[in-house]
Image (cartoon, grey):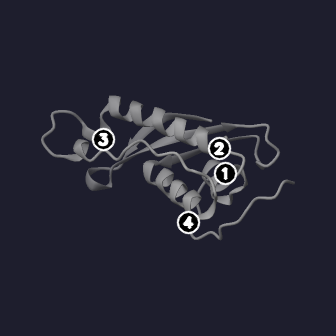
Amino acid sequence: IDVSNPQTVGVGRGRFTTYEIRVKTNLPIFKLKESTVRRRYSDFEWLRSELERESKVVVPPLPGKAFLRQLPFRGDDGIFDDNFIEERKQGLEQFINKVAGHPLAQNERCLHMFLQDEIIDKSYTPSKIRHA
């Protein structure tokens, strides 16, 4: 799984960065062998909380929230600074690869939605994925 191609969209308080998530897998449990979706940091937070709630997986931490970077008058672009975005991208990639590499996490519907569905249905019914 690669996390790449960060894009910052929106303006002011509605501004955020999305990351491209590219999956290539030969695991039969995934319906698509290759997929690409865009996710933002809050989507990773959603996935992490779903996994903690629904599975017995010890979920690794996400790269930290950037509270200090959100302070005004910084002299850089804060959370939209290229170096910060690059660091966060690498942290998110490590996180998602650890999670997706866990056999129990691979059975969770939330992981499949996160990795392969264009839009995350946050009102979904948590369930296990059965091997085809």
Numbered marks: total? 4
SS state under label 3: helix
Question: Looking at the rendering, which quadrant does residue 68 occupy?
Answer: top left
The residue sitting at 60% across, 38% down in the picture is: 97
User: Are the residues tagged 2 and 1 within 8 Å (C-beta)?
Assistant: yes
The residue sitting at 38% across, 35% down in the picture is: 85
| Mark 4 to mark 1 CA distance (whole Å) | 17 Å
Q: What residue would you read off at disc 2?
A: 100
For label 3, count other residues whose C-alpha is less than 10 Å away and answer few (under 14), some (14-19) or many (20+). many
The disc at residue 105 is 1
Nearest the eye: 112 or 82? 112
The mark that comes first in sequence, 4 or 1, is: 1
Instruction: Give the amino acid type for the residue marked by disc 2 in the picture.
Output: Ala
Instruction: Give the amino acid type for the residue marked by disc 4 in the picture.
Output: Lys
Query: Vertically, is 81 above or below 62?
Result: above
The mark that comes first in sequence, 4 or 2, is: 2
Instruction: Give the amino acid type for the residue marked by disc 1 in the picture.
Output: Ala
For label 4, count other residues whose C-alpha is less than 10 Å away and answer few (under 14), some (14-19) or many (20+). few
User: Are the residues tagged 3 and 1 within 8 Å (C-beta)?
Assistant: no
| Mark 2 to mark 1 CA distance (whole Å) | 6 Å
The mark that comes first in sequence, 2 or 3, is: 3
The mark that comes first in sequence, 2 or 1, is: 2
